[in-house]
Image: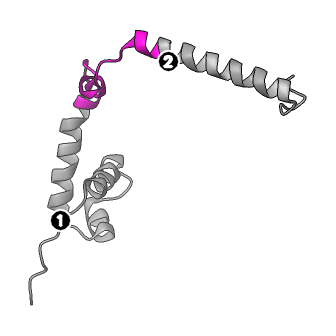
Amino acid sequence: MSKRPRRNHSPAFKAKVALAAVKGEKTLAELAQQFDVHPNQITQWKAQLLDGAAGVFGTEPKAGADAPPVDVKTLHAKIGELTLVNDFLESALGKAGLLPSAKR
């Protein structure tokens, strides 16, 4: 009997298997057969999922920490500039007769 080569499972696959184990609709043996992994591996992934679940609901936002700070004044200036350009183009198209009748 030859050994199976070592497999690297994606995080999405691990999460899928662990969530199926957490649901409890099937036994570990059934899940192991369905996903072709060892029951001990499913138990480890389930424990990792449950241990890391508290981090999802942490008090400090992680997405905001990586994002650069937003300069609101610059954004407001850009909005004003674009509004002026739109108004100018709308009036120019209206004078040229190229603006649809609903916009006039």
**Element under disc 2:** helix
Colour scheme:
one colour
Q: Is residue 102 magenta?
A: no
- In the image, residue 56 sits, relative to residue 70, either above or below, namely below
Q: Nearer the N terminus, badge 1 or badge 2?
A: 1
Query: At which x and y percent is residue 34?
Result: 33, 69
Q: Amino acid at mark 1?
A: Asn
**Element under disc 1:** loop
Residue 78: which disc? 2
Q: Is residue 74 left or right of residue 79?
A: left
- In the image, residue 86 sits, relative to residue 44, either above or below, namely above
The residue that label 1 is drawn on is 8
Residue drawn at point x = 28 percent, y = 31 percent: 56
The image quarter containing residue 99 is top right
Residue drawn at point x = 71 percent, y = 25 percent: 89
Task: In the displayed orientation, state which residue is furthest to the right.
Answer: 101
| Residue interval drawn in magenta | 55-75
Residues 83 and 19: in front is 83
How crowded is the residue under tag 2: few (<14 C-alpha within 10 Å), some, or many (20+)? few
The image quarter containing residue 96 is top right
Q: Amino acid at mark 2?
A: Lys
